[in-house]
Image (cartoon, grey):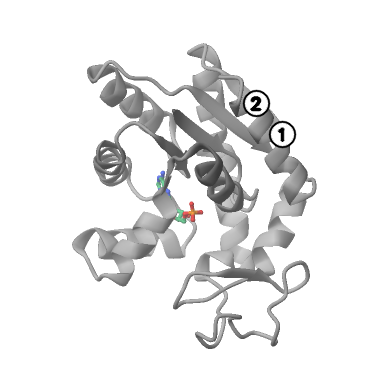
């Protein structure tokens, strides 16, 4: 099963992906996580991506497509794409790469949510730089203020969760990523629209119900 999870930054794609991969035995391919790992490893790709990521801009298509097509090949046809494709060019290139292997995307899960809600979610988010665990200052508090529950140490606010960068990421989303949905609609792809301004468990239930039927 090949699934694409679409939605603005902060819509809960990462959380829902973790649940989807467990339920359907898929691999989670998050372009943002892969880029962050490249940066942490100090790779050439990581240093090329840094400036774009820290200002809320998109990393150039060429770099991302190569990185993601390689990750998809390693995942062997069972994956959820999270954060990719993020431009129509990426969607077209993904389609070409899949078609060359006689494959296609089976479904798009489209998380729908207002900008004001996601802005609050992102600016309140705190992350553990050691284990990657994610918390929220209001909705998902760590046991001790600003400390990771797993004992790793201080939590941080990711640079791209800072208010000015959040605004930039949302405007990038509307300008460049929202058209990806139109692309998949025009291509006749199966699209499941999910209300993402809801309890986490009920969002998961709606996603599972739809994916069970493909
Ligand atoms: P995310 O964690 O998915 O919000 O991604 C964090 C940052 O990584 C984004 O703001 C972009 O700078 C970069 N990024 C992630 N995925 C892509 C992509 N598909 N195309 C271009 N840039 C990306």
Residue 89 sits in quarter = top left
Picture coordinates of residue 211, whole percent (x, y):
59, 27
Q: Which residue is mark 1?
A: 206
Residues at badges 2 and 1 in contact (C-beta under 8 Å)? yes
Give the answer, above or below, for where 81 lies relative to 43.
above
Residue at point 63%, 50% (across, down): 12
Whole-number angstrom distance, CA of label 2 to CA of label 1: 6 Å
Residue at point 54%, 28% (across, down): 108
Q: Which mark is residue 97?
A: none
In the rendered view of the protein, which quadrant contains the N terminus? top left
Give the answer, above or below, for where 168 lies relative to 6.
below
Out of 74 and 13, give the one closest to the viewer: 74
Q: Which mark is residue 210?
A: 2
Out of 28 and 84, give the one closest to the viewer: 28
Residue at point 49%, 57% (across, down): 56
Classify mark 2: helix, strand or loop.
Answer: helix
Can I make out residue 61 in this image? yes
């Amino acid at each position: 099963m090949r699934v694409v999870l679409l939605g603005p930054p902060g819509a809960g794609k990462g959380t829902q992906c973790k649940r989807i991969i467990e339920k359907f035995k898929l691999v989670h391919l998050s372009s943002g996580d892969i880029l962050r790992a490249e940066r942490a490893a100090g790779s050439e790709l990581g240093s090329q991506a840094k400036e774009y990521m820290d200002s809320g801009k998109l990393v150039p298509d060429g770099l991302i497509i190569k990185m993601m097509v390689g990750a998809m090949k390693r995942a062997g046809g069972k994956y959820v794409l999270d954060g990719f494709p993020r431009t129509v060019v990426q969607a077209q290139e993904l389609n070409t790469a899949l078609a060359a292997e006689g494959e296609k995307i089976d479904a798009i899960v489209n998380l729908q949510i207002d900008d004001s809600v996601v802005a609050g979610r992102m600016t309140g988010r705190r992350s553990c730089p050691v284990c990657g665990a994610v918390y929220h200052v209001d909705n998902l508090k760590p046991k001790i203020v600003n400390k990771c529950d797993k004992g790793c140490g201080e939590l941080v606010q990711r640079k791209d969760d800072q208010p000015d960068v959040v605004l930039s990421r949302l405007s990038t989303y509307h300008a460049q990523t929202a058209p990806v949905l139109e692309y998949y609609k025009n291509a006749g792809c199966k699209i499941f629209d999910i209300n993402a301004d809801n309890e986490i468990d009920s969002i998961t239930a709606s996603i599972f119900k739809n994916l069970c039927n493909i």
